[in-house]
Amino acid sequence: MGRQYFIKKGFQSKFIIKFCLIVILGAIISGIILYASTNQRLGNTYLESLNTIKVLNDNLISNLIYTSLATVIFISIVTIIITLFASHKIAGPLFRLEKNTEIIGNGDLTLETRLRKNDEITGVASALNEMAGKLRSKMIDIRTDLEEVKKGSADIESAIKDKRLSEKELKKQITRLSNRIKSLNRAISKFTVS
């Protein structure tokens, strides 16, 4: 399978178009500055025209250097600004996801990751929220089953001490407790830890 260069096509296409527009705008500005710095009237006579051409020729290199320098500065500033805003749409949410993943990893399954609507990785935040929700649901099931096992165990222990249960009732309680333990095992088996 070949490499896939366009992953988030919309974001990448906009970024490429913006960069191309910056280059085109830089070329237009460069042309305008060069035209303005070299646009001179030649003069009325042949000698005036030759003199004007000589002055233009002498100044052409310096005009090209200044024009190129101004264009590079302009393109650099605009590129920095656009890159800063574009990377902010990625770096900011990634930082938030990193922190929230750490919090969820430490056991807070109630945390919901919220990003701005126009951030580029809202799909990852949705997947993280869905994962935390599923984990929360499984943990609630495990906690409920565990409480039932504890309660059932305490009831059986108390009944045995007080000799309140018949052998048939005791077997029934043990079966109920065994079913809860199986339910716990099923819930725990859904997690892969090794």
Image (spheres, rainbow, N blue to C red):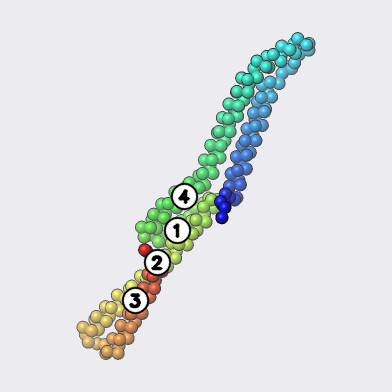
The residue singled out by tag 2 in the image is 191
Pointer 1 or 2: first along the chain = 1
173 relative to 61, above or below: below
Pointer 2 or 3: first along the chain = 3
* Residue found at the very far top of the displayed protein: 47
What's under tag 1, amino acid-wise? Answer: Glu
What's under tag 4, amino acid-wise? Answer: Leu
60 relative to 156, above or below: above
Residue drawn at x 69%, y 24% as measured from the top left = 35
Residues packed near mark 4 inside 10 Å, few (<14), some (14 to 19) or many (20 plus):
some
Give residue 77's position: percent from left, percent from top: 55, 33
Residue drawn at x 64%, y 28% as measured from the top left = 30
Can the viewer see residue 140 in this picture? Answer: no
Mark 3 and mark 4 in contact (Cβ < 8 Å)? no
Residue drawn at x 44%, y 65% as measured from the top left = 134
Residues packed near mark 3 inside 10 Å, few (<14), some (14 to 19) or many (20 plus):
some
117 relative to 18, above or below: below
The residue singled out by tag 4 in the image is 94
> Viewer-proximal residue, 172 or 8?
8
The residue singled out by tag 3 in the image is 181
The residue singled out by tag 1 in the image is 112
The N terminus - image quarter: bottom right
192 relative to 121, above or below: below
Q: Secondary structure at mark 1?
A: loop
> Viewer-proximal residue, 98 or 192?
192
Give residue 57's position: percent from left, percent from top: 67, 17
Disc 4/disc 3 C-alpha distance (Å): 40 Å
